[in-house]
Image (tube, rainbow, N blue to C red):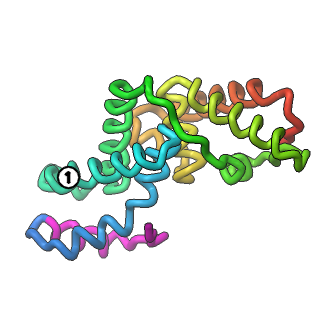
Amino acid sequence: MTEVTHVDNLAERQLILKIKEGDQQAFHELILLFEKKVFRLAWGFFQDRDEAMEIVQETFLKVYEKIDRYDERSSFQNWLLRISKNLCIDAYRKFKHRKTHQQDVFELVEKWGQTAVKSEDRVDRDSFEQSLKEGIAGLSNRQRLVFVMKHYNLLKYQEIAQVLKISVGTAKSLHHRASKSLQKKLAHYEVSE
C-alpha cells in the first residue's frame, strides 16, 4: 500500500469533485491517499490482515456509493474513518468468535511511548506480544477505537472526537482508560513509560 502523507485541502476537494463526476482515476488516487489509514484502523481493531483488507475494500466501496452525500464543508478524512469505524464494529459483532492471527506489536509499543520487553528471549517476546494482543482485544469497542486511532493512525484527540462524534474530553478519557488497562495487563513485564 502507498500512502501520501499530506493532502492539500484544495487538491482534495478537486479530487472529490472529479470523483462525483465519475472520474475513475481520481477515485484510484483517493484510495492511494487514504488506504493506509483505513487499513491501520481495521488492523488495530481485528489484528488480522485479511479482515483488515476486507474492511479497506468495503470502506472504499461505501465511499464510492455515497460520495454524493459527502458534505465538502466537513473533513473528508473524518467522514471516511467514520465509515470505516462503523464497518469495523459491524464486522466485529458478526465475527468476534473468529481467532485473530499473531501480530508483531513492538512497533505499536514504541509508538505508544514504551520500550519492549528488555529480555531478548524469544519466549518472553512471544508472551509479551500475546499479552498485548489480548489486552487490546479485551478493551471495550470505544476504548479500542480511540487507542487504535491515536496510535495506529496518529490522529489528534480532536480528530478522534469528530470521527466518533464524542467530546474531546471523552476521547481523552477513553484513551486514558485503555492505556491504564493495557499497562495493568502488562505490569508483570519490564516496560517503562
Q: Is residue 114 above or below residue 139?
A: below
Element type at mark 1: loop
Residue 184 as seen in the image, left or right of residue 167:
right
The residue under label 1 is 70
User: Is residue 16 within the magenta segment?
Assistant: yes
Residue 137 as seen in the image, left or right of residue 95:
right
Quick one: 150 or 119, which is closer to the camera?
119
Q: Residue at x 76, y 24 (%)?
A: 184
Q: Amino acid at mark 1?
A: Tyr
Q: Residue at x 75, y 48 (%)?
A: 113
Q: Position of residue 120 (x, y in %)?
A: 88, 50
Q: Is residue 156 visible?
A: yes
Quick one: 67 or 46, which is closer to the camera?
46
Q: Residue at x 65, y 29 (%)?
A: 135
Question: Total number of numbered labels?
Answer: 1
Q: Position of residue 114 (x, y in %)?
A: 79, 46
